[in-house]
Image: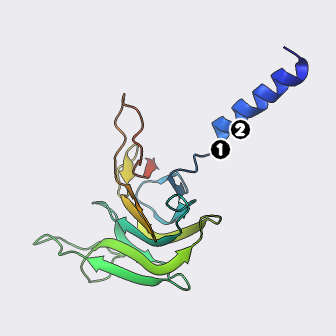
């Protein structure tokens, strides 16, 4: 094997190890401190084959509070709320409204040759060393990706894995 071939092989391996898969919904950041307020971006890097994305729907997991979506020009923003359990106390930084269950951005168009990031500001649970999963449904003109399969330890990664945020101490 020539020196050039081995260098090319090494560079390809390093690129593959450091480049996130484009066939996933990416989170920005990928980890955050537990019990903090952050802006979390959901990066949509492709459509459905050759079909552009027309909706991004995010389900808010239990323990995530004070959710505030960022409007996106050209998209309709819908916040779906759920009833708080009877007797539940609201967090100090949460408005006196029902908790957010889902956030939908619809009616826009994200061509397959571009990517975009959809942001939510939120308060994270106080559970360090845990992963919080955010199921996402990505709808396209033709087709849909349901990023709702939670990865399981010791199992192969699902075809459409749910994006997870690692909570640090």
Q: Quadrant of residue 80?
A: bottom left
Residue located at (66% from left, 40% from top): 18
Residue located at (26% from left, 83% from top): 97
In the image: residue 49, left or right of residue 101 = right
Tell me if residue 148 comes above or below residue 100 in the rendering: above
Residue on which the image places disc 2: 15
Element type where label 2 sits in the image: helix
Tell me if residue 90 comes above or below residue 133 in the rendering: below
Element type where label 1 sits in the image: loop
Residue located at (29% from left, 60% from top): 63
Q: Are marks 1 and 2 in contact (CB under 8 Å)?
A: yes
Residue 125, how many percent across, how many down?
A: 35, 58
- Quick one: 64 or 87, which is closer to the camera? 64
Q: Quadrant of residue 99?
A: bottom left
Residue located at (42% from left, 69% from top): 122
Could you say which disc has been placed on residue 19 in the image?
A: 1
- Quick one: 54 or 50, which is closer to the camera? 50
Residue 156, how many percent across, how many down?
A: 40, 32
Tell me if residue 34 comes above or below residue 65 in the rendering: above
């Amino acid at each position: 094997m020539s020196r050039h071939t081995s260098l090319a092989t090494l560079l390809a391996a390093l690129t593959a190890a450091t480049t996130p898969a484009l066939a996933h919904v990416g989170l920005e950041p990928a980890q955050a401190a537990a019990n903090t307020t952050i802006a979390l971006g959901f990066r949509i890097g492709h459509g459905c084959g050759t079909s552009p994305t027309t909706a991004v729907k995010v389900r808010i997991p239990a323990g995530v509070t004070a959710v505030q979506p960022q409007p996106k020009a050209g998209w309709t923003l819908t916040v779906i709320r759920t009833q708080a359990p009877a007797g539940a106390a609201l967090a100090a930084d949460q408005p006196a409204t029902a908790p957010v269950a889902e956030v939908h951005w619809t009616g826009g168009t994200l061509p397959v040759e571009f990517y975009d990031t959809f942001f939510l500001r939120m308060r994270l649970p106080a559970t360090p060393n845990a992963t919080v999963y955010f199921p996402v449904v990505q709808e396209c003109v033709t087709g849909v990706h349901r990023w709702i399969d939670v990865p399981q330890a010791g199992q192969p990664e699902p075809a459409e894995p749910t994006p997870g945020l690692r909570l640090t101490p």
